[in-house]
């Protein structure tokens, strides 16, 4: 079963009736006296397991009657009693009910809600072991998809952070009413049940400070808060992004309706308390869909963008523009990308999935020409503006998907010597892979945020390219996510 199928199952969790302590004890006794087949296991049952390893989503993996069990919160080497939350023909999901043998790598999570919401799923695992795990996630993905020669690929040790906390420069918190009071936070995994987050150890502290004061102001002014069940109310989400280098900060109110009551008074009070805020925006999203952002964004006060600086360059960031969430590790990521590309002054470089141009512009001084593309129009506007404000004249960015724009450039006679791709988690489009293989630039670097789609894409890519090495980089400490830079050389 692939990771996507497993994720889909996990997104539809069911929960059994609450089980009393006495019932749990009886079930444990019955298990040892009368072992059951996996087909006999029901939601709410408890089973003893020895955890063998971690899965790609950070869950502990054990085996019960030859059926694989994914146990949230369990660590390798531990003996646990697991409470079953899902039963399927080929796998079982559960969560830790009791730990009978504790891993020496287990640590106390900083955040009390680390087991409830996403973004903290490895906070109970010692950080050096997190780094080992993230390299292993790449190995697991390669073993699953088996691109030719994968056993010989060099997987370099994961580059981590000295202080793996307070790194996220953007907070994107849902706003709802809980027990009649305004709350802001994240959903419990697999649900739309909000968990209020008064603190968050992986966020830049300023983002959380602003959100907590904003919540008090929403309460003070009795702001209309969105109700997901009735699709009524106004305020859905608050987004706060801090530019790490300049400390310029942007606040975005995402609303269900064009009107947001008392927004001027709220802005006045936030601006008075936080002089770092230079941009207040409103994004309108009246859809019932789970997508956070709508298409229309308005300036309420201040600048349209905030200015970030990275590797000696300045970048203007609009509300929806993609920018890496961990600025300190972003410099590491781009340094590894430059090393893998080995550009020369005569190279024409394609920067696919360019965002606001951060990768391509950081490489422009080493290349003859840089061309990039992205399917978010505001990001392309930002990219071309960023080239202008940095005095870079050999870089140009075009709106459109990589799989359409690159073939158009190739047809017009543009011949790239090098290409760097930094796709979203879904990986590369097959049409883009075809275009890359047909044009066959000498240097090809794949920057990946999803080991599974990376391994899948390499199945085709290695038809024409050799994998020199894969360098994993920890952009998201305390989570199961990992980025990787892959150096590819034409055969």
Image: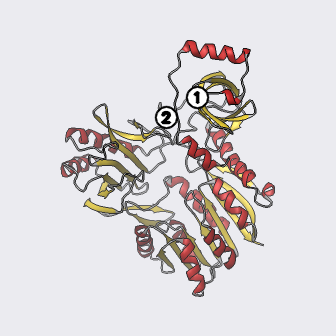
The residue that mark 1 highlights is 43
Q: Nearer the viewer, residue 332 or 251?
A: 251
Asked whether residue 440 is in view, the answer is no
Q: How many numbered discs sit on the rendered protein?
A: 2
Asked whether residue 247 is in view, the answer is yes
Tell me the SS state at disc 2: loop
Residue 89 figure quarter: top right
Colour scheme: secondary structure
Quadrant of the drawing holding the C terminus:
bottom right
Q: Give the number of the mark in front: 2 or 1.
A: 1
The residue that mark 2 highlights is 116
Residue 314 figure quarter: bottom left
Residue at 30% across, 43% down: 230
Query: Where is residue 290 shown, x and y percent of the image?
Result: 42, 50
Residue situated furthest bottom in the rendering: 413
- 2 or 1: tag closer to the N-terminus: 1
Tell me the SS state at disc 1: loop
Residue at 71% across, 66% down: 460
Q: Is residue 167 left or right of residue 273?
A: right
Residue at 24% across, 44% down: 224
Query: Where is residue 256 shown, x and y percent of the image?
Result: 30, 52
């Amino acid at each position: 079963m692939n990771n996507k199928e497993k994720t889909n199952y996990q997104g539809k969790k069911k929960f059994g009736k609450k089980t009393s302590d006495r019932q749990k004890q009886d079930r444990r006794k019955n298990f040892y006296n009368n072992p059951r087949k996996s087909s006999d296991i029901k939601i709410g049952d408890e089973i003893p397991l020895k955890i063998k390893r971690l899965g790609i989503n950070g869950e502990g993996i054990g085996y019960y009657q030859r059926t694989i069990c994914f146990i949230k919160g369990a660590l390798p080497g531990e003996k646990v009693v697991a409470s079953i939350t899902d039963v399927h023909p080929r796998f079982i999901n559960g969560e830790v009910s009791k730990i009978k043998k504790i891993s020496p790598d287990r640590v106390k999570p900083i955040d009390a809600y680390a087991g409830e919401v996403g973004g903290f799923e490895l906070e109970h695992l010692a950080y050096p072991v997190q780094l080992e795990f993230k390299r292993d996630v790449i190995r697991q993905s390669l073993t699953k998809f088996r691109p030719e020669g994968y056993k010989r690929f060099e997987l370099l040790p994961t580059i981590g952070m000295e202080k793996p906390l307070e790194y996220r420069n953007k907070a994107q918190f849902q706003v709802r009413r809980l027990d009649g009071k305004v709350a802001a936070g994240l959903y419990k995994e697999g649900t739309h049940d909000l968990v209020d987050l008064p603190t968050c150890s992986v966020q830049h502290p300023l983002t959380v400070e602003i959100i907590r004061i904003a919540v008090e102001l929403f309460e003070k002014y009795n702001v209309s808060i969105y109700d997901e069940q009735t699709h009524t109310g106004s305020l859905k989400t608050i987004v706060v992004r801090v530019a790490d280098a300049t400390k310029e900060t942007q606040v975005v109110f995402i609303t269900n309706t064009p009107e947001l009551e008392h927004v001027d008074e709220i802005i006045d009070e936030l601006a008075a308390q936080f002089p770092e805020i230079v941009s207040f925006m409103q994004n309108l999203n009246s859809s019932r869909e789970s997508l956070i952002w709508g298409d229309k964004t308005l300036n309420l006060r201040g600048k349209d963008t905030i200015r970030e600086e990275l590797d000696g360059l300045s970048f203007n960031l609009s509300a929806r523009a993609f920018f890496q969430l961990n600025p300190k590790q972003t410099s590491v990521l781009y340094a590894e990308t430059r090393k893998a590309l080995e550009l020369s002054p005569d190279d024409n470089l394609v920067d696919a999935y360019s965002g606001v141009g951060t990768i391509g512009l950081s490489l422009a001084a080493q290349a003859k020409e840089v061309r990039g593309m992205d399917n978010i129009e505001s990001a392309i506007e930002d990219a071309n503006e960023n080239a202008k404000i940095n005095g870079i004249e050999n870089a140009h960015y075009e709106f459109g998907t990589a799989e359409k724009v690159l073939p158009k450039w190739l047809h017009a006679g543009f011949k790239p010597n090098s290409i760097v791709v930094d796709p979203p988690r879904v990986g590369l489009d097959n049409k883009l892979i075809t275009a890359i293989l047909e044009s066959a630039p000498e240097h090809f670097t794949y920057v990946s945020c999803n080991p599974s789609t990376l391994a899948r894409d390499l199945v085709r890519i290695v038809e024409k390219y050799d994998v020199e090495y894969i360098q994993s980089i920890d952009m998201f400490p305390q989570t199961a996510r990992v980025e990787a830079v892959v150096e590819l050389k034409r055969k």
